[in-house]
Image: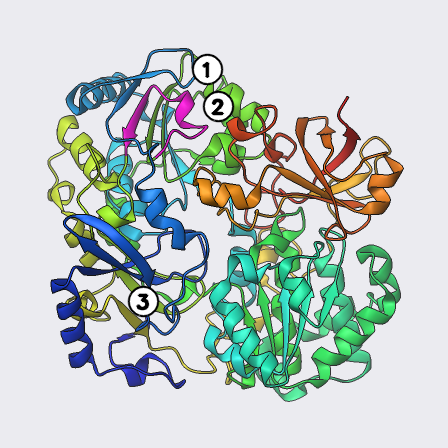
Amino acid sequence: MTSPIALDDAAASPVSRTSATSAAAAGAAAAAASAGRVIGACPHDCPDTCSFVTTVQDGVAVKLQGNPDHFHTAGVLCTKVSRYLERNAHEGRLVQPMKRVGPKGSGRFEPVGWDEALDHIVRELKRRADRPETIVPYSYAGTMGLVQGESMDRRFFHKLGASLLDRTICSTAGGEAFGYTLGGKVGMRVEFFAESKLILIWGSNSIGSNLHFWRHAQAARRAGARLVCIDPRKSETADKCDEHVALLPGTDAALALSMMHELIVNDWLDHAYIAAHTVGWEQLRERALQWPPSRAAVVCGVPETQIVALAGAYGTTRPAAIRLNYGMQRVHGGGNAARAVACLPALVGAWRERAGGVLLSSSGQFPVDRAALHRPDLLAGRRPRTINMTTIGDALLDRAHPVEVLFVYNSNPVAIAPDSSKVVQGFARDDLFTVVLEQFQTDTADYADYVLPATTQLEHWDIHFSYGHTDVLLNRPALAPRGEARSNTWVFRELARRMGYDEPCFVDDDETLCRAAYPPAVLDFDELQQRGFASLRIPEAPFAEGNFPTPSGRCEFFSARLAALGLDGLPDHVPNRELPGSSARYPLAMISPPARNFLNSTFVNVQSLRSMEGEPLLEINPVDAASRGIADGAVVRVFNDRGEYRCRAEVSARARPGVVNGLGIWWRKLGLAGTNVNELTSQALTDIGRGPTFYDCLVEVAADA
């Protein structure tokens, strides 16, 4: 989708806000800069993509706050990012290149100069000139920035001919499912949730992971809306909602199909919308009628009456909205589940109103020019193999198709990848040459041959899209890089020079890369520099008259594209591979939602946040704890055939019976026995999108001997 970007307040959002004209905002920004205030953007993997302001005195950041002039941030930062200055100035920041001098995993390094490190790395690369596919990049959303996350690095590895990385670790199941149903990662605008009368918060702990959406949900509730949380865990968000539907992990599609059943039998349908703007209604109707609430209640582990009431509320309340998040798609049938939920708004005509519909991600609405950033033409017709990042453990242990050189940046795979005992075995290989670009000595950095010190968001340029709202944000550096830290782009630019790559694109500086991220016709970069943000022009109710970005232009209940791949063209309930109740040895299902004060494995080393979390925890229901003789606060062993994890038990109703919640993602070396929850998770992939199945996991729990 190539929507133009508005830089005037009237086009930025139709909702009421206090803001100046573009000219006044530009003048205010210039005045702020002269006073030592620099506008930046939060880089972390969160839908909110906040604009923040850093106050600098004598080259030192003394204050960081949410930007009050940015509507979506509204001057508020989450607890994590409000500690960003603590993280930036952390005594553990890496400030010079380091070379390993001890065994892999020991964390023993000595400082070296940049020239020595880069020259050695280049020699290793040139040794593989005839087999570049043995070289693998591994990166994800340690920064969501388009420049430090996916620009010069992509150009470098394309020119090199290295293996490609399928970046699946988070969102591909739901993202591709929405693509097959709605045409992409598109949906309603987040600010209009404030006008909804019913909000289903599905698979999301919004208070911890989507704070600025929660502001709109609360506004809706104050105006009389009902909030329903659908989540296996009784999260902090569930505490604040009017109702909690505590379904079993991996049963979301069954719930959605049963809701469809009730919409059909009670005729809570918008027949005109279905006829004009959908494909495959008769096939979907037939499938949904196979899912009466009595059947779904058994599968989902929730009362039949609750399903009936939920469907009734959804079918009779206008406008009704669904905020879907990625937790629910991290199971075998995650793609089908996301498809099923994505079908619901079209059935009741929720898209007709701006406060109706569904939002999983808004990222598909941004006209990012990735070809300009990535330069796939540098592959020059080569078709390297693709390695799925979710199965990096198996890939590193595959001797038939070896990985010989690994570059890790913007990620911490030893901590965050599933089946981590295999990941550790792979990283520990003596014949694997590993380079890690990092800000801290993470679990992954401990296995590197070279650790290269990386800049933080306060020290480099970047430009951002969002997957929770529809603004472009610019990040300007507020501080000089600490010590000898260098940006990701600097490292890959310098490697390209030493490799002898002479294409002009390898000398683009970071501001040039920021300008390349969006076509000039849709973004006035000079004005973006002044304000720090710009808003996409998105219709208030984008699918009120259909016009979905699918091949048919309709919401595709039946996907001919999926059918052409030999897959089911209709959404269905696809049971977990590790089905609750199917194993006598491992009778408990485990999900591993993020700890509230961490973001994946980021912020784990920030002392103030770690103090809030205390230590690694497993939430276990009192019924399950009592039958195992587990007391609150006891150390327990959580185990299955993949491994064992020791942590502290919290006996709590936050865990429903039969399900335990292993809060993550702690660095392994900060755990009680040098492991974390991913010792137990599987490398199996989702039905659609090749994604991870972190929440499709059976375990047993026992008191530690």
Image vertical order of residue 82 relative to residue 506, above or below: below
Q: Label 2, secondary structure: give it.
A: helix
| Residue 365 position in % (x across, y down) | 39, 67
Are the residues flagged by discs 1 and 2 in contact, CB closer than 8 Å? yes
State which tag comes first along the sequence, 3 or 2: 3
Q: Which residues are magenta?
A: 440-453
**Cα–Cα gap, marks 1 and 3:** 46 Å
Query: Crowding near pointer 1: few (<14 within 10 Å), some, many (20+)?
Result: some
The amino acid at mark 1 is Arg
State which tag comes first along the sequence, 1 or 2: 2
Name the residue beneath numbered marker 1. Answer: 429
Name the residue beneath numbered marker 3. Answer: 67
| Residue 480 position in % (x across, y down) | 17, 44
The amino acid at mark 2 is Leu
Colour mode?
rainbow
Q: Label 3, secondary structure: give it.
A: loop
Q: Residue furthest bottom?
A: 272
Given residues 15 and 235, the one toward you in this image is 235
Left or right: where 461 falls relative to 604: left
Name the residue beneath numbered marker 2. Answer: 396
| Residue under the point 39% across and 62% down | 466
Given residues 456 and 273, the one toward you in this image is 456
| Residue 558 position in % (x across, y down) | 63, 66
State which tag comes first along the sequence, 1 or 3: 3
Nearer the camera: disc 3 or disc 2: 3
**Cα–Cα gap, marks 3 and 2:** 43 Å
Left or right: where 688 falls relative to 191: right
Nearer the camera: disc 1 or disc 3: 3
